[in-house]
Image (cartoon, coloured by chain):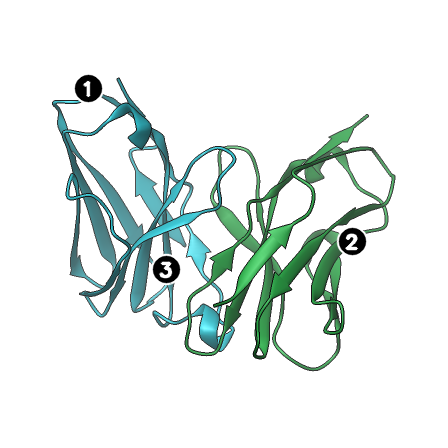
Chain colours: A cyan, B green
């Protein structure tokens, strides 16, 4: 496998369920990101990890819990979500956590389409 | 803080026609500018980026963009589009030491 992979690609869950999204990057990068993409809205950066350490949490509700056991894997644990949390969740990676600020490229996975009922 | 505005949310064009997707940014310091594309059911991938030097940047799939500092713009162009160019296009901006800020996206639909 190359690039950034995400599983599952689609997920339907009830508001009382607990589920996890998984992201894996095969690019040797040090930084990983979770974004939320909702219709008609700009991409929302949720979390940033650099060398497994969280460097940014953009006021994300606690029902979203990230985990980064190593530089290649990133998880997003979900519990007691709301219908408004339905969206496409994108994982990305880059060589450095300030990738954009040095002109580096972020590499995105295909996303997990989440529907909360 | 920097910001980016994509002036058109939807752009419908016919196949083989030229297209321009508009992007304006605001920043008080030097910027890096990016265009990403998202094909249906896929993540974003980089089309091209401007870091410095020549203001005309060529990217993949025949796209190019021109950095215009005086107009704070970074419009994306292609002289002749294909059906396969149908996708959402995102402009993004960053400044040294900061993260990427994305625009709201422009849906390009190429019709036969």
Question: Relative to A27, does residue A87 appear above or below in the rendering?
Answer: above
Residue that label 3 marks: A93
**Number of the front mark, 3 or 1:** 1
Chain name for mark 3: A
Chain name for mark 2: B
**Do the CB atoms of the residues marked 3 and 1 lie less than 8 Å apart?**
no
Residue A97 visible within the image: yes
Residue B62 is situated, as x and y percent measured from the top left of the image, at 76, 54
Same chain for marks 2 and 1? no
Label 2 secondary element? strand
Residue that label 2 marks: B77
Q: Residue at x 20, y 47 (%)?
A: A75
Q: Residue at x 23, y 52 (%)?
A: A74
Q: Is residue B94 left or right of residue A6?
A: right
Q: Looking at the image, how many numbered discs can be counted on the residues?
A: 3
Residue A62 is situated, as x and y percent measured from the top left of the image, at 15, 44
Task: Identify the image quadrant of the C terminus of chain A.
Answer: top left
Same chain for marks 2 and 3? no
Chain name for mark 1: A
**Number of the front mark, 2 or 3:** 2
Binning the other alpha carbons within 10 Å of mark 1 as few (below 14), some (14 to 19) or many (20 upward) gives some
Q: Residue at x 87, y 38 (%)?
A: B16
Residue B94 is situated, as x and y percent measured from the top left of the image, at 51, 68
Q: Residue at x 49, y 65 (%)?
A: A105
Q: Is residue B62 left or right of residue B38?
A: right
**Do the CB atoms of the residues marked 2 and 1 lie less than 8 Å apart?**
no
The label number, if any, that marks residue A14 in the structure image? 1
Question: Relative to A26, does residue B84 appear above or below in the rendering?
Answer: above
Binning the other alpha carbons within 10 Å of mark 3 as few (below 14), some (14 to 19) or many (20 upward) gives many
**Mark before the other along the chain sequence, 3 or 1:** 1
| Cα separation between marks 3 and 1 | 29 Å
């Amino acid at each position: 496998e190359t690039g950034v992979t995400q599983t599952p690609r689609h997920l339907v869950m009830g508001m009382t369920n607990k589920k996890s999204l998984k992201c894996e990057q095969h690019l040797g990068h040090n930084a990983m990101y979770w974004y939320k993409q909702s219709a008609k809205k700009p991409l929302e950066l949720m979390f940033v990890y650099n060398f497994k350490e969280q460097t940014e949490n953009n006021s994300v509700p606690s029902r979203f819990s990230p985990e980064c056991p190593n530089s290649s894997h990133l998880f997003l644990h979900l519990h007691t979500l709301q219908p408004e949390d339905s969206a496409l969740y994108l994982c990305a990676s880059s060589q450095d956590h300030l990738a954009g600020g040095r002109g580096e490229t972020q590499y995105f996975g295909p996303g997990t389409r989440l529907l909360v009922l | 803080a920097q910001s980016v505005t994509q002036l058109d949310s939807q752009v419908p064009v016919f196949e083989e026609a030229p297209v321009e997707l508009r992007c304006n940014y605001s920043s008080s310091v030097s910027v890096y500018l990016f265009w990403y594309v998202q094909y249906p059911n896929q993540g974003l991938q980089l089309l091209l980026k401007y870091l410095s030097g020549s203001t005309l940047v060529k990217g993949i799939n025949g796209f190019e963009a021109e950095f215009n500092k005086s107009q704070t713009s970074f419009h994306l162009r292609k002289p002749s589009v294909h059906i396969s160019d149908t996708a959402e296009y995102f402009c993004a901006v960053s400044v040294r030491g900061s993260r990427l800020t994305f625009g709201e996206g422009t849906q390009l639909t190429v019709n036969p």
